[in-house]
Amino acid sequence: MAKLGRELSAKGIDVINLSFGEPDFFTPEFVKEAAKKAVDENYSYYTPVSGYLDLRKAVADKLLRENGLTYNFDQIVVSTGAKQSLANAVMCLVDPGDEVIVPTPYWVSYSEMIKLGEGESVFINATVENNFKITGAELEAAITPKTKLFMFSSPCNPTGSVYSKEELADLVAVFEKHPNIYIISDEIYEHINFVGKHASIAEFDAIKDRVILINGFSKSYAMTGWRVGYMAANKEIANACDKLQGQITSGTSSIAQRAALEAYKGGLDTVNEMVAEFKKRRDIVHELLSAIPGVNVNLPDGAFYFFPEIKAYFGKTDGTTVINTAEDLSLYLLNEAHVSTVTGEAFGNEDCIRISYAASEEQLRKAVSRIADALAKLS
Ligand code: PLP
Protein backbone atom coordinates (compact mmCIF):
# COMPACT_ATOMS: atom_id res chain seq x y z
CA MET A 1 0.00 0.00 0.00
CA ALA A 2 2.86 2.34 0.88
CA LYS A 3 4.54 1.56 -2.47
CA LEU A 4 1.33 2.19 -4.40
CA GLY A 5 0.85 5.41 -2.43
CA ARG A 6 4.36 6.55 -3.39
CA GLU A 7 3.66 5.75 -7.06
CA LEU A 8 0.53 7.90 -6.98
CA SER A 9 2.43 10.70 -5.23
CA ALA A 10 5.14 10.50 -7.90
CA LYS A 11 2.42 11.19 -10.48
CA GLY A 12 1.64 14.42 -8.64
CA ILE A 13 -1.45 13.14 -6.82
CA ASP A 14 -1.98 14.47 -3.28
CA VAL A 15 -1.96 11.21 -1.30
CA ILE A 16 -2.59 11.42 2.46
CA ASN A 17 -0.67 8.68 4.18
CA LEU A 18 -2.49 7.22 7.18
CA SER A 19 -0.55 3.98 7.07
CA PHE A 20 2.34 5.17 9.22
CA GLY A 21 3.34 3.22 12.32
CA GLU A 22 5.42 5.99 13.81
CA PRO A 23 4.82 9.33 15.52
CA ASP A 24 4.88 12.34 13.18
CA PHE A 25 6.84 14.26 15.83
CA PHE A 26 10.53 15.05 16.02
CA THR A 27 12.82 13.42 18.57
CA PRO A 28 13.01 15.80 21.59
CA GLU A 29 15.80 18.39 21.40
CA PHE A 30 17.50 17.28 24.61
CA VAL A 31 17.77 13.75 23.24
CA LYS A 32 19.25 14.98 19.96
CA GLU A 33 21.76 17.08 21.91
CA ALA A 34 22.86 13.99 23.85
CA ALA A 35 23.53 12.19 20.56
CA LYS A 36 25.60 15.11 19.22
CA LYS A 37 27.60 15.14 22.44
CA ALA A 38 28.17 11.39 22.17
CA VAL A 39 29.61 11.84 18.68
CA ASP A 40 31.98 14.53 19.95
CA GLU A 41 32.96 12.37 22.91
CA ASN A 42 33.92 9.54 20.56
CA TYR A 43 31.29 6.98 21.45
CA SER A 44 32.32 5.22 18.29
CA TYR A 45 33.34 1.76 19.48
CA TYR A 46 31.48 -1.53 19.75
CA THR A 47 29.12 -1.51 22.70
CA PRO A 48 28.53 -4.33 25.21
CA VAL A 49 26.14 -6.87 23.65
CA SER A 50 23.36 -6.18 26.19
CA GLY A 51 23.85 -2.42 26.07
CA TYR A 52 25.84 0.12 28.08
CA LEU A 53 25.71 -0.58 31.79
CA ASP A 54 24.41 2.91 32.65
CA LEU A 55 21.59 2.54 30.12
CA ARG A 56 20.59 -0.86 31.52
CA LYS A 57 20.61 0.67 35.00
CA ALA A 58 18.52 3.60 33.75
CA VAL A 59 16.01 1.14 32.29
CA ALA A 60 15.84 -0.72 35.62
CA ASP A 61 15.35 2.65 37.40
CA LYS A 62 12.58 3.59 34.97
CA LEU A 63 10.79 0.28 35.50
CA LEU A 64 10.87 0.86 39.27
CA ARG A 65 9.98 4.56 39.13
CA GLU A 66 7.17 4.40 36.56
CA ASN A 67 5.94 0.83 36.84
CA GLY A 68 6.81 -0.24 40.38
CA LEU A 69 8.74 -3.20 38.94
CA THR A 70 12.01 -4.38 40.43
CA TYR A 71 14.62 -5.65 37.98
CA ASN A 72 18.37 -5.85 38.36
CA PHE A 73 20.41 -4.38 35.49
CA ASP A 74 21.51 -7.90 34.47
CA GLN A 75 17.90 -8.74 33.66
CA ILE A 76 17.80 -6.00 31.02
CA VAL A 77 18.95 -6.61 27.43
CA VAL A 78 19.06 -3.55 25.18
CA SER A 79 18.54 -4.36 21.50
CA THR A 80 18.19 -2.88 18.04
CA GLY A 81 14.63 -1.78 18.64
CA ALA A 82 11.86 -3.55 20.54
CA LYS A 83 11.49 -5.65 17.42
CA GLN A 84 14.82 -7.36 18.02
CA SER A 85 13.92 -7.88 21.69
CA LEU A 86 10.70 -9.60 20.58
CA ALA A 87 12.53 -11.74 18.04
CA ASN A 88 15.24 -12.65 20.57
CA ALA A 89 12.62 -13.81 23.05
CA VAL A 90 10.69 -15.85 20.49
CA MET A 91 13.87 -17.49 19.13
CA CYS A 92 15.09 -18.37 22.62
CA LEU A 93 11.78 -19.74 23.89
CA VAL A 94 10.03 -21.39 20.96
CA ASP A 95 11.02 -24.86 19.80
CA PRO A 96 9.63 -26.57 16.67
CA GLY A 97 6.00 -27.53 17.22
CA ASP A 98 5.46 -25.28 20.25
CA GLU A 99 2.22 -23.37 20.22
CA VAL A 100 2.16 -19.62 20.75
CA ILE A 101 -1.16 -18.00 21.61
CA VAL A 102 -1.67 -14.62 19.97
CA PRO A 103 -4.84 -12.55 20.33
CA THR A 104 -5.88 -11.09 16.97
CA PRO A 105 -5.61 -8.45 15.70
CA TYR A 106 -1.88 -8.59 16.42
CA TRP A 107 1.17 -6.68 15.28
CA VAL A 108 2.20 -8.06 11.87
CA SER A 109 5.61 -9.37 12.88
CA TYR A 110 4.40 -11.66 15.70
CA SER A 111 3.14 -14.43 13.44
CA GLU A 112 6.22 -14.19 11.20
CA MET A 113 8.59 -14.40 14.17
CA ILE A 114 6.73 -17.47 15.41
CA LYS A 115 7.14 -19.03 11.94
CA LEU A 116 10.87 -18.31 12.05
CA GLY A 117 11.01 -20.05 15.42
CA GLU A 118 9.18 -23.02 13.81
CA GLY A 119 6.34 -22.61 16.26
CA GLU A 120 2.60 -22.67 15.56
CA SER A 121 0.49 -19.56 16.09
CA VAL A 122 -2.82 -20.17 17.84
CA PHE A 123 -5.04 -17.16 17.34
CA ILE A 124 -7.84 -15.93 19.59
CA ASN A 125 -10.10 -13.63 17.62
CA ALA A 126 -11.04 -10.43 19.38
CA THR A 127 -13.60 -8.14 17.77
CA VAL A 128 -14.63 -4.51 17.84
CA GLU A 129 -17.62 -5.44 20.06
CA ASN A 130 -15.27 -6.29 22.96
CA ASN A 131 -12.83 -3.47 22.18
CA PHE A 132 -10.51 -6.05 20.62
CA LYS A 133 -9.62 -7.59 23.96
CA ILE A 134 -9.76 -11.22 25.05
CA THR A 135 -10.93 -12.72 28.33
CA GLY A 136 -9.42 -15.29 30.66
CA ALA A 137 -12.04 -17.83 29.53
CA GLU A 138 -11.02 -17.39 25.88
CA LEU A 139 -7.38 -17.75 26.86
CA GLU A 140 -8.09 -20.91 28.84
CA ALA A 141 -9.91 -22.45 25.87
CA ALA A 142 -6.90 -21.87 23.58
CA ILE A 143 -4.35 -23.56 25.87
CA THR A 144 -3.12 -27.06 25.02
CA PRO A 145 -0.25 -29.17 26.40
CA LYS A 146 1.87 -27.71 23.56
CA THR A 147 1.36 -24.07 24.57
CA LYS A 148 4.72 -22.47 25.28
CA LEU A 149 4.07 -18.78 24.99
CA PHE A 150 1.45 -16.03 24.96
CA MET A 151 2.28 -12.87 23.05
CA PHE A 152 0.37 -9.59 23.07
CA SER A 153 0.68 -5.81 23.03
CA SER A 154 -1.07 -3.33 25.33
CA PRO A 155 -1.59 -0.61 24.22
CA CYS A 156 -2.14 -2.56 21.04
CA ASN A 157 -1.02 -2.04 17.50
CA PRO A 158 -3.27 -2.13 15.41
CA THR A 159 -6.33 -1.52 17.62
CA GLY A 160 -5.19 0.96 20.27
CA SER A 161 -6.78 -1.27 22.92
CA VAL A 162 -5.43 -1.02 26.46
CA TYR A 163 -5.87 -3.79 29.02
CA SER A 164 -6.80 -2.52 32.48
CA LYS A 165 -5.28 -4.03 35.61
CA GLU A 166 -8.53 -5.94 36.19
CA GLU A 167 -8.57 -7.33 32.66
CA LEU A 168 -4.96 -8.42 33.06
CA ALA A 169 -5.84 -10.06 36.39
CA ASP A 170 -8.41 -12.17 34.53
CA LEU A 171 -5.65 -13.46 32.22
CA VAL A 172 -3.19 -13.88 35.07
CA ALA A 173 -5.62 -16.15 36.93
CA VAL A 174 -5.37 -18.52 33.94
CA PHE A 175 -1.58 -18.29 33.69
CA GLU A 176 -1.33 -19.18 37.37
CA LYS A 177 -2.99 -22.50 36.55
CA HIS A 178 -0.48 -23.15 33.73
CA PRO A 179 3.02 -22.61 35.13
CA ASN A 180 4.83 -23.67 31.93
CA ILE A 181 3.57 -20.81 29.79
CA TYR A 182 5.71 -17.72 29.22
CA ILE A 183 4.21 -14.32 28.45
CA ILE A 184 5.68 -11.74 26.08
CA SER A 185 4.22 -8.38 27.04
CA ASP A 186 4.91 -5.82 24.33
CA GLU A 187 4.57 -2.41 25.99
CA ILE A 188 6.17 -0.26 23.30
CA TYR A 189 3.12 2.08 23.29
CA GLU A 190 3.09 2.31 27.11
CA HIS A 191 3.04 6.09 27.34
CA ILE A 192 0.54 6.66 24.53
CA ASN A 193 -2.33 5.81 26.82
CA PHE A 194 -5.36 8.06 27.27
CA VAL A 195 -6.96 6.29 30.23
CA GLY A 196 -4.46 6.82 32.98
CA LYS A 197 -1.67 4.76 34.37
CA HIS A 198 -0.29 1.96 32.25
CA ALA A 199 -0.79 -1.51 33.71
CA SER A 200 1.82 -4.17 32.99
CA ILE A 201 1.16 -7.87 33.35
CA ALA A 202 4.59 -8.06 35.02
CA GLU A 203 3.03 -6.29 38.03
CA PHE A 204 1.54 -9.63 39.07
CA ASP A 205 4.17 -11.22 41.30
CA ALA A 206 2.77 -14.73 40.84
CA ILE A 207 3.81 -14.75 37.17
CA LYS A 208 6.42 -11.98 36.93
CA ASP A 209 9.28 -14.45 36.51
CA ARG A 210 7.61 -15.80 33.34
CA VAL A 211 6.94 -12.39 31.80
CA ILE A 212 9.26 -11.00 29.15
CA LEU A 213 8.53 -7.29 29.21
CA ILE A 214 9.36 -5.50 25.96
CA ASN A 215 9.64 -1.75 25.63
CA GLY A 216 11.77 0.89 23.95
CA PHE A 217 12.17 4.45 22.79
CA SER A 218 10.65 4.37 19.30
CA LYS A 219 7.14 5.51 20.06
CA SER A 220 7.29 7.43 23.36
CA TYR A 221 10.30 9.52 22.35
CA ALA A 222 9.62 9.57 18.60
CA MET A 223 12.88 7.68 17.98
CA THR A 224 11.82 5.00 15.50
CA GLY A 225 14.95 5.37 13.37
CA TRP A 226 17.36 5.35 16.29
CA ARG A 227 16.73 1.64 16.96
CA VAL A 228 16.81 1.21 20.71
CA GLY A 229 14.51 -1.19 22.55
CA TYR A 230 14.91 -3.58 25.43
CA MET A 231 13.57 -6.55 27.33
CA ALA A 232 13.30 -7.13 31.04
CA ALA A 233 13.11 -10.81 31.92
CA ASN A 234 14.35 -13.45 34.30
CA LYS A 235 18.12 -13.84 34.24
CA GLU A 236 18.12 -17.12 32.37
CA ILE A 237 16.11 -15.69 29.48
CA ALA A 238 18.09 -12.43 29.51
CA ASN A 239 21.34 -14.42 29.31
CA ALA A 240 20.03 -16.54 26.44
CA CYS A 241 18.98 -13.44 24.51
CA ASP A 242 22.37 -11.84 25.17
CA LYS A 243 24.05 -14.94 23.70
CA LEU A 244 21.82 -14.94 20.63
CA GLN A 245 22.18 -11.22 20.04
CA GLY A 246 25.95 -11.49 20.44
CA GLN A 247 26.14 -13.70 17.36
CA ILE A 248 23.71 -11.71 15.24
CA THR A 249 23.92 -7.93 15.69
CA SER A 250 26.04 -7.34 18.81
CA GLY A 251 25.07 -4.27 20.86
CA THR A 252 22.98 -1.58 19.19
CA SER A 253 24.32 1.82 18.09
CA SER A 254 26.55 3.59 20.61
CA ILE A 255 25.23 7.07 19.75
CA ALA A 256 21.59 5.97 19.92
CA GLN A 257 22.16 4.37 23.32
CA ARG A 258 23.69 7.58 24.74
CA ALA A 259 20.64 9.47 23.44
CA ALA A 260 18.24 6.89 24.90
CA LEU A 261 19.92 7.20 28.30
CA GLU A 262 19.25 10.93 28.25
CA ALA A 263 15.62 10.31 27.21
CA TYR A 264 15.04 8.28 30.38
CA LYS A 265 16.88 10.77 32.55
CA GLY A 266 15.01 13.71 31.05
CA GLY A 267 11.50 12.98 32.30
CA LEU A 268 8.17 12.76 30.56
CA ASP A 269 7.36 16.37 29.59
CA THR A 270 7.86 15.91 25.85
CA VAL A 271 6.09 12.56 25.97
CA ASN A 272 3.09 14.10 27.71
CA GLU A 273 2.89 16.92 25.15
CA MET A 274 2.84 14.40 22.31
CA VAL A 275 0.23 12.25 24.04
CA ALA A 276 -2.05 15.27 24.59
CA GLU A 277 -1.87 15.99 20.86
CA PHE A 278 -2.61 12.36 19.99
CA LYS A 279 -5.62 12.39 22.31
CA LYS A 280 -6.99 15.51 20.64
CA ARG A 281 -6.64 13.88 17.24
CA ARG A 282 -8.14 10.62 18.46
CA ASP A 283 -11.27 12.43 19.59
CA ILE A 284 -11.62 14.32 16.31
CA VAL A 285 -11.08 11.25 14.13
CA HIS A 286 -13.41 9.16 16.27
CA GLU A 287 -16.21 11.65 15.84
CA LEU A 288 -15.64 11.87 12.09
CA LEU A 289 -15.35 8.12 11.51
CA SER A 290 -18.36 7.35 13.70
CA ALA A 291 -20.51 9.52 11.45
CA ILE A 292 -19.76 7.39 8.35
CA PRO A 293 -22.45 4.77 7.70
CA GLY A 294 -21.14 1.20 7.67
CA VAL A 295 -17.97 2.08 9.57
CA ASN A 296 -18.06 0.29 12.92
CA VAL A 297 -15.49 1.98 15.10
CA ASN A 298 -14.66 1.84 18.81
CA LEU A 299 -12.88 4.47 20.89
CA PRO A 300 -9.29 3.24 21.31
CA ASP A 301 -7.68 3.95 24.67
CA GLY A 302 -4.11 4.21 23.43
CA ALA A 303 -1.49 4.06 20.64
CA PHE A 304 -2.35 6.12 17.54
CA TYR A 305 -4.55 3.87 15.44
CA PHE A 306 -8.18 3.19 14.66
CA PHE A 307 -9.16 -0.27 13.49
CA PRO A 308 -12.67 0.19 12.10
CA GLU A 309 -14.71 -2.77 10.93
CA ILE A 310 -15.71 -2.09 7.34
CA LYS A 311 -17.25 -5.40 6.31
CA ALA A 312 -20.60 -3.66 5.64
CA TYR A 313 -19.04 -2.60 2.33
CA PHE A 314 -18.24 -6.13 1.16
CA GLY A 315 -20.18 -6.96 -2.01
CA LYS A 316 -20.66 -3.28 -2.87
CA THR A 317 -19.36 -1.58 -6.00
CA ASP A 318 -18.80 1.88 -7.47
CA GLY A 319 -19.81 0.51 -10.88
CA THR A 320 -16.36 -0.76 -11.84
CA THR A 321 -14.71 -2.13 -8.69
CA VAL A 322 -16.36 -4.72 -6.45
CA ILE A 323 -15.21 -4.66 -2.83
CA ASN A 324 -14.88 -8.20 -1.49
CA THR A 325 -12.15 -7.87 1.11
CA ALA A 326 -10.50 -5.37 3.43
CA GLU A 327 -7.61 -5.27 0.98
CA ASP A 328 -10.00 -4.35 -1.83
CA LEU A 329 -11.39 -1.55 0.30
CA SER A 330 -7.96 -0.28 1.28
CA LEU A 331 -6.95 -0.23 -2.40
CA TYR A 332 -10.20 1.47 -3.36
CA LEU A 333 -9.59 4.18 -0.74
CA LEU A 334 -6.11 4.71 -2.07
CA ASN A 335 -7.21 4.99 -5.69
CA GLU A 336 -10.48 6.86 -5.14
CA ALA A 337 -9.86 8.94 -2.00
CA HIS A 338 -6.06 9.07 -2.27
CA VAL A 339 -5.79 8.03 1.34
CA SER A 340 -3.38 5.27 2.28
CA THR A 341 -4.49 2.86 5.05
CA VAL A 342 -3.43 -0.68 5.97
CA THR A 343 -5.60 -3.70 5.32
CA GLY A 344 -6.68 -5.71 8.37
CA GLU A 345 -5.47 -8.98 6.83
CA ALA A 346 -1.93 -7.88 7.73
CA PHE A 347 -2.96 -8.00 11.39
CA GLY A 348 -4.93 -11.24 11.22
CA ASN A 349 -8.36 -9.62 10.80
CA GLU A 350 -10.20 -9.70 7.48
CA ASP A 351 -13.02 -7.30 8.34
CA CYS A 352 -11.12 -4.16 9.31
CA ILE A 353 -8.60 -1.62 8.10
CA ARG A 354 -6.03 0.28 10.15
CA ILE A 355 -6.04 4.05 10.10
CA SER A 356 -3.12 5.80 11.78
CA TYR A 357 -3.62 9.30 13.17
CA ALA A 358 0.06 10.15 13.17
CA ALA A 359 -0.74 13.08 10.89
CA SER A 360 -1.75 16.72 11.37
CA GLU A 361 -5.31 17.62 12.33
CA GLU A 362 -5.78 19.31 8.96
CA GLN A 363 -4.60 16.23 7.07
CA LEU A 364 -6.77 13.97 9.22
CA ARG A 365 -9.92 16.01 8.63
CA LYS A 366 -9.25 16.09 4.90
CA ALA A 367 -8.50 12.35 4.80
CA VAL A 368 -11.62 11.26 6.68
CA SER A 369 -13.79 13.54 4.57
CA ARG A 370 -12.33 11.97 1.41
CA ILE A 371 -12.88 8.47 2.86
CA ALA A 372 -16.53 9.34 3.59
CA ASP A 373 -17.06 10.63 0.03
CA ALA A 374 -15.45 7.56 -1.52
CA LEU A 375 -17.50 5.16 0.61
CA ALA A 376 -20.69 7.03 -0.26
CA LYS A 377 -20.10 6.11 -3.91
CA LEU A 378 -20.38 2.39 -3.12
CA SER A 379 -23.75 0.67 -3.37
N1 PLP B 1 5.79 -3.72 18.87
C1 PLP B 1 4.75 -3.12 18.29
C2 PLP B 1 3.37 -3.47 18.74
C3 PLP B 1 4.95 -2.17 17.27
O1 PLP B 1 3.90 -1.57 16.70
C4 PLP B 1 6.26 -1.87 16.86
C5 PLP B 1 6.52 -0.91 15.77
O2 PLP B 1 5.67 -0.56 15.00
C6 PLP B 1 7.31 -2.53 17.51
C7 PLP B 1 7.05 -3.45 18.51
C8 PLP B 1 8.74 -2.29 17.11
O3 PLP B 1 9.31 -1.23 17.81
P1 PLP B 1 10.81 -0.81 17.54
O4 PLP B 1 10.79 0.35 16.59
O5 PLP B 1 11.34 -0.40 18.88
O6 PLP B 1 11.54 -1.97 16.98
Image (cartoon, helix red, strand yellow):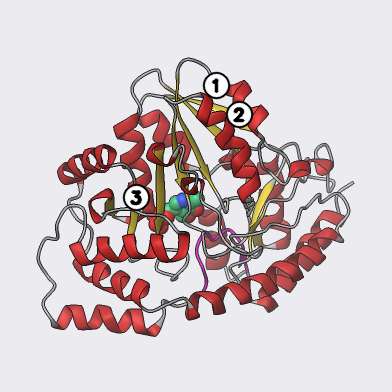
Q: Is residue 105 visible?
A: no
Q: Determine the secondary structure under disc 2.
A: helix
The amino acid beneath tag 2 is: Leu
Whether ligand 1 has any atom under 8 Å from the Cβ at mark 2 is answered as: no
The residue carrying pointer 2 sits among few (fewer than 14), some (14 to 19) or many (20 or more) residues within 10 Å by Cα, namely some
Task: Give how far apart the Cα atoms at labels 3 and 1 are.
Answer: 25 Å
Query: Which residue matches tag 3?
Result: 231
- Rendered view: 105 above or below 194: above
The residue lying at 58 percent from left, 58 percent from top is: 19
User: Is residue 17 part of the magenta span, yes or no?
Assistant: yes
Q: Would you say 317 lies left or right of 186 here? A: right
Q: Which residue type does callout 3 highlight?
A: Met
3 or 1: tag closer to the N-terminus = 1
Q: Residue at x 78, y 52 (%)?
A: 297
Q: Residues within 10 Å of mark 3 (few under 14, many from 20)?
A: many
Q: Residues within 10 Å of mark 1 (few under 14, many from 20)?
A: many
Residue 122: quarter of image: top right
The answer to whether mark 3 and mark 2 are in CB contact below 8 A is no
State yes or no: residue 90 in magenta.
no
Residue, disc 2? 139
Please state the horizontal and vertical placement of residue 275, each as a whole percent of the image: 58, 72
Residue interval drawn in magenta: 15-25
Residue at point 42% right, 66% down?
Answer: 65
Tell whether label 2 touches label 1 (CB within 8 Å).
yes
Q: Is residue 291 visible?
A: yes
**Which circle's residue, 3 or 2, is located before the other in the chain?**
2
Question: Horizontal and vertical percent for residue 268?
Answer: 47, 76
319 displayed left or right of 9: right
Q: Is residue 20 left or right of residue 249?
A: right
Location of mark 1 (residue): 143
